[in-house]
Image (spheres, helix red, strand yellow):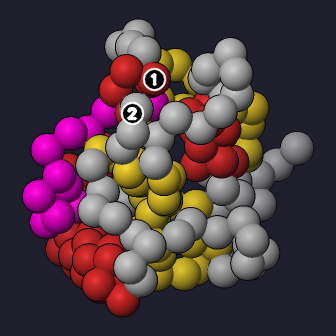
Amino acid sequence: MEPKKYEMLNLTWEQCQDKCEILSRYISISRHINNDIDPIDIIVCVGRGGMIPSRLIAESLNIKDIVMYNISSYNSIGLEGKSEIKETIPFNYYDILSYKNVLIVDDVATTMSSINYIRQKIIMNRADNVMYCRAIYSATLYCNKNLSSNNRPDFIASEYDANNTWIVFPWEKN
């Protein structure tokens, strides 16, 4: 099957840094407006796309701890593949995330499959299937505007139409 033709949205480093700053402000403002949102203790970045945004957001919000969960959902432009999970380093999520407020960060949420997979992995990592961190939030630079309201990240810097636009981040090969 031939890939669909997309309009390419080639982002600059400056645009991505601006989106990270927007996300940081949203998270910070939400903490002050909604008393039920505690400070983020740790970021779980979706590797590889979430690595740079996670670092920038962590710097802005003074978050010291970042761990990576490596997952890939796309084989090439427009061809969504099976999610392939690879942990960069084997570690016990229970020990690291226990009693913490977690922020999952990715560069783009087209279907939410990566963020949802990692969220479920965090929740279901224990034999008793009880969530052991205090809260799990999610953030992305770009979110598919066609996603349903109950399947979206908690914090979004910008929206795009995944039906006709393919985003190219400066850290990706063209």
Badge 2 crowding class, 10 Å Cα cut-off, few under 14, some 14 to 19, many 20 or more, is: many
Magenta residues, as a range?
56-69
Query: Residue 170, can we see it?
Result: no
Q: Position of residue 98 (x, y in %)?
A: 40, 32
- For the residues labelled 2 and 1, the Cα–Cα distance comes to 6 Å
**Residue, disc 1:** 94
Q: Quadrant of residue 73?
A: top right
The image quadrant that residue 4 belongs to is bottom right
Q: Nearer the viewer, residue 39 or 16?
A: 39
Residue found at the far bottom of this picture: 33
Is residue 27 visible to the viewer in this orientation of the structure?
A: yes
28 left or right, relative to 8? left
Tell me residue 169's x, y (percent): 37, 59
Label for residue 97?
2
Q: Are marks 2 and 1 in contact (CB under 8 Å)?
A: yes
Name the residue type under label 1: Tyr
Q: Residue at x 53, y 70 (%)?
A: 154
Compared with residue 153, is residue 81 higher up or lower down, i.e. above or below? above
**Residue 107 % position (x, y):** 43, 58
The residue most toward the right is 1
Above or below, comparing residue 170 to residue 163 in the picture = above
